[in-house]
Image: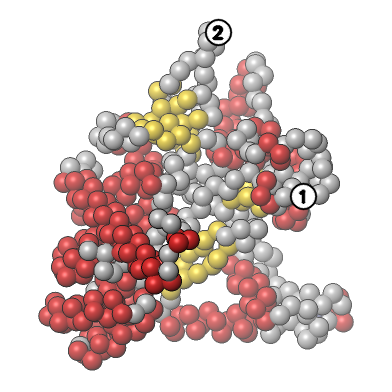
Amino acid sequence: MDFGAMSAEGLIDALRSAHGAAARAQAAEVFAVRELYRRHRAESAEPGPGGVRAGEYAASEAAVALHSDEATMGVLIDIGLALEESLPRTRLAFEQGRIDLAKVRVIVDCTRGLTREVAGAVETRLIEAAERTEPARLRQTARRWAARLDPSGAQRRRELRQDQRDVRIRATQDSMAVFDGQLPAPGAQTVAMRLREMSLQVCTQDPRTMPQRRADALVALADGSGRLRCRCGRGQRCASSGAAAETPRRPLIQIGIPADSLLGMSEAPAFLAGYGPIDAALARTLAEHARFQVISEQDESGGPVAEARRRHSTARRVRALDGMCRFPGCVMPAAESELDHERISEGRRPTGGGSVRTEPIVLCARHLRLKALADKGKSGWRVARAGLDRLRWITPTGDVHTTVREGARYLFPHSDIDAPLAARTGSDRCESAPEPGLLPRDRPTAEELTFPLAGHLPVHRQLTRLAPEDEIPDER
Ligand SMILES: [Zn+2]
Ligand SMILES: [Zn+2]
């Protein structure tokens, strides 16, 4: 299409028709993944108590194929099921590209607490409204109509909404993360008032703004110190200096940092488990109060003593080098994951007669279960080792996805062979921090850009447990 030659009207028409095509493509994605889920459910090998786990790895397969995350795929399945079960006209409008995924999501969300009759009465009108308005206003309209048509259902809708309470974090960049959630209003207000109270515990000379104090107060609540320390720097003259604060609990976080970054001889980034790269200066600040475990790169020395030491140190070494769950796209920190000791078939033996020493791998509870099923031949997945560093995941449809030891990329920067060259030429001991664009690529975090679904919690309860961080670990 030659947009340069088009009139303004032509451009708007092209925009509309492209958006309609995008909506039809979104509908195709939703119905394809829902169909995949239906098939997985039908042949589910280990459905778990009450069938809650039936079909759960349909989302894994779809996520791996699209390089998305499992929770997002779970939401697509949920929307597909809801459209099929109770919203036939919305489904049709979506298939025809008359309304896009963002609006479909609002309609699914706003009709979930309604009785069948009310939902039926309101659906057609909502589709008409959706064709005229943007999602935010559509949501308001839907809520107003629901309140009118079904005033006695307010309590039921509130209780349903309370089931969606949740708090989670989302990695952004530059060592920052979004902390975000949905709470019942009284609980949210309790947190807000407590943060405000803590923000006012410091003396008037504290240099921080209220937003900064609230943010620090939330962390102080979590680390057990329970009180905001004043930063006026006046020592005994500070009016709040007498107040005793509890010592912060450590460690609640794990960081991998190369030795020369720790010593300030290099600025290679460190790895904050569950988040991704943080800059070396921040890691050094955090290290002032840290407990240390040293992980050496080579651990190949022979002899019985070295062998015993190696066995002893294997678990923490594997966790440090793997850094996180080894399933493609999963970002569960190694410390919150399990070690899988099952033998993994080796794709290729090294020449020269030496045998590859197989180390266990780190898997979160959800993906450990997936691999256990694979080991028993009960799922279509296969897992194969490709050298000590690489792990191949072969999906039921034969796609191959490889994961590497992410933690090792940080601990031993020279092993990060995929990093752009410019970042590694010259001395590793450069004084200035490297350009942000040249840092090793972030591990994708559970942040979604392709699907406008943030904050959607599934209607179908079995689909609320697809994100690895939502798995409740078994008793250890
Ligand atoms: Zn002070
Ligand atoms: Zn995992």
Answer whether residue 121 is visible to the viewer in this image.
Answer: yes
| Residue drawn at point x = 30 percent, y = 56 percent | 25
Q: Residue extending furthest left?
A: 117
Mark 2 or 1, which is nearer the eye? 1
The foreground one among 156 and 90 is 90
| Residue drawn at point x = 52 percent, y = 18 percent | 356
Residue on which the image places disc 2: 352
| Residue drawn at point x = 34 percent, y = 40 percent | 370
Residue on which the image places disc 1: 433
Q: Secondary structure at mark 1?
A: loop
User: Measured along the vertical axis of the image, is residue 453 above or below residue 428?
Assistant: below
x and y, in percent, of residue 266 in the image: 78, 43
Q: Answer few, some or many: residues within 10 Å of disc 1's Cα (few below 14, many 20 plus, some between 14 and 19).
A: some
Q: Answer few, some or many: residues within 10 Å of disc 2's Cα (few below 14, many 20 plus, some between 14 and 19).
A: few
Answer whether residue 291 is visible to the viewer in this image.
Answer: no
Q: Is residue 406 left or right of residue 384?
A: right
The foreground one among 451 and 244 is 451
Q: Amino acid at mark 1?
A: Ala
x and y, in percent, of residue 181 in the image: 46, 71
The foreground one among 70 and 369 is 70
Q: Amino acid at mark 2?
A: Gly
Q: CA distance from mark 2 to mark 1?
A: 42 Å
x and y, in percent, of residue 310 in the image: 60, 27
The foreground one among 396 and 28 is 28
